Amino acid sequence: MKFSLPALTLTGVLALGALTACDGNFRRTVDLGGQSTTATEPSTATTESGTTTTPATDTGAGTATPPATDTGAGTATPTPATFDNGRARTESEANTVQVVKEQQNGLVFISVTESSANSEEAQLRQRLQQQFGIPDTGAQPSQGTGSGFFVNKQGDIITNNHVVEGASEITIKLHDQKEYKAKVIARAPDFDLALIRAENVPAASIQPIPLGDSDQLDVGLKAIAMGAPFGLDFSVSEGIISNLERTVPVGQPTGNRQPVYQKVIQTDAAINPGNSGGPLLNSAGQVIGVNTQILTGGIGQSAGVGFAIPVNTVKRLLPQLQSGKTEVIQPPTLGIQFTDLSGLPEDFRTQNKLPDTGALLQRVYPNSPASRANLQAGTNAVPLGAGNAGEQISTNGDIITAIDGQPVTEGEDLRRAVIGKAIGDKITLSLTRGGQTRQVTVELQAFDFPQQTQQ
């Protein structure tokens, strides 16, 4: 089962200051420290007389609290717990402390600046502010903050695209509070991801955080969010993975492209503006996602529903981002405009002998992958009827009913399937038209749309 959220409940920006954005319902986005400890493995011993002992607990000071003893009469005599400086050490707590201690030096705090209010970058930032209803504070130069993390020893850092898009200057701060300049290597706006590279950072100060496998996750597993909520750099929060089948629109509108509903990791770990681009970790200290958005219910801060881009998306795009061959990575497209049949009135579908679901082609752009595969758009114009303001659609074009054998039950199925592929991949489309069915193979390529389109 897929769970989708309406686009109007999402914002595109989670960073702080000039980068914070909110449409009234949805916004995008923990103190590191503590001392490491080793949790004892739980063990239970049964004596010859039938009495049992509960596991001893490591207090972190090298001594274990004595276990409670079962007297055999059904009651246990508890032994008072001892604490190390007032701190309890459950197995889960010890694990969280260990993860934070091991990975905190891989987290970076990101500050961005536009040097001039009239620069192209500043104007872009201003447009984003207007789009998401952020008041202009008049502060010059414009600034914003976010988070990121090292992915290799060369100083490459993954963050959100919305953290660094439009920035003329980027500064990173490490956990030791030292600051360095960084530059954008490449951005993938459709996935809200960017790769920046730190300059002149000593090799000993670069600690990559290992990347996990988001396909191996289960609902209920621990999730640890690291970042800089509200500019409080190097903070941590903890929760669980709440859902793995949620889809939300990811990415900022870029040119003629719109955000595409993509699968994300939902977590109840507190994520707030400034957590953007920070890692979501599992109990093994591996990155499982990149924090990107939060559902706020209109209050402008974490309400216990946050979203992270799955790390396998990062792993798939990382080679392209690191190559630096192009500053902006475009996902593959078909080069079509279509109507989602599931959104049409039932009587209209019946009258025009259209199926309940599928993508009905309205336009196939010249020189696009779809055009080269001879996909055909409709040529007639049929009014939708009363209540649709004279809107017309073509009904005699190809209908995409499946992609690689997977049914297209709604328009977003097609968009998700295509954006999940790589340039050069081949896909098989199942098509119907005029009662005839056929299959075609399309080689996906990047394509610049000449105007606003749906795919």
Image: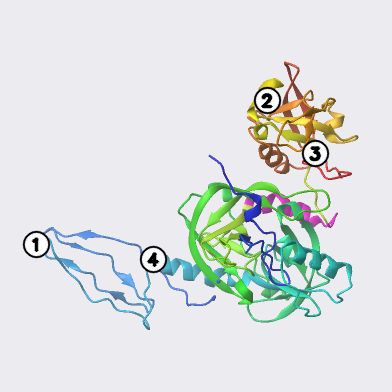
Instruction: Rate crowding at label 4 as few (under 14), some (14 to 19) or many (20 or more) other CA atoms within 10 Å.
Output: some
Amino acid of disc 1:
Ala
Q: From the viewer's perspective, is residue 320 above or below residue 160?
A: above
Q: Earlier in the sequence, mark 3 or mark 1?
A: 1
What is the secondary structure assignment of the residue under circle 2? helix
> Which label is found at residue 73?
1
**Residue 92: x %, y % from top left:** 41, 65
Whole-angstrom CA distance, mark 3 to mark 2, is 35 Å
Whole-number angstrom distance, CA of label 4 to CA of label 1? 29 Å
Specify how the rendered protein is coloured. rainbow
Circles 1 and 2 in contact, beta carbons < 8 Å? no
Q: Which of marks 3 and 2 is nearer the N terminus?
A: 2
Which amino acid type corresponds to the residue marked 2 in the rendered image?
Arg
Neighbourhood count class around disc 2 (C-alpha, 10 Å): few under 14, some 14–19, many 20 upward? some
Task: Judge from the rendering whether residue 449 lies leftward or rightward of residue 391; answer left or right.
Answer: right
Label 3 sits on what residue type? Answer: Gly
The mark closer to the camera, 3 or 2, is 2
The CA distance from mark 1 to mark 2 is 74 Å
Q: Residue 424 carries which label?
A: 3
Q: CA gap, disc 3 to disc 4?
A: 47 Å
Which residues, given as a range, are shown in magenta?
A: 312-327
| Quarter holding residue 152 | bottom right
The numbered dot on residue 349 is: 2
Circle 3 — which element?
Answer: loop
Q: Where is residue 452 in the image (x, y as percent from the top left)?
A: 83, 45
The residue singled out by tag 4 in the image is 91
Name which of mark 1 and mark 2 comes first in the sequence: 1
**Above or below: residue 434 compared with residue 391:** above
In primary-sequence order, the first of circles 4 and 1 is 1
Residue in the picture at 69% in, 59% down? 12
Classify residue 36 as left or right of residue 393: left
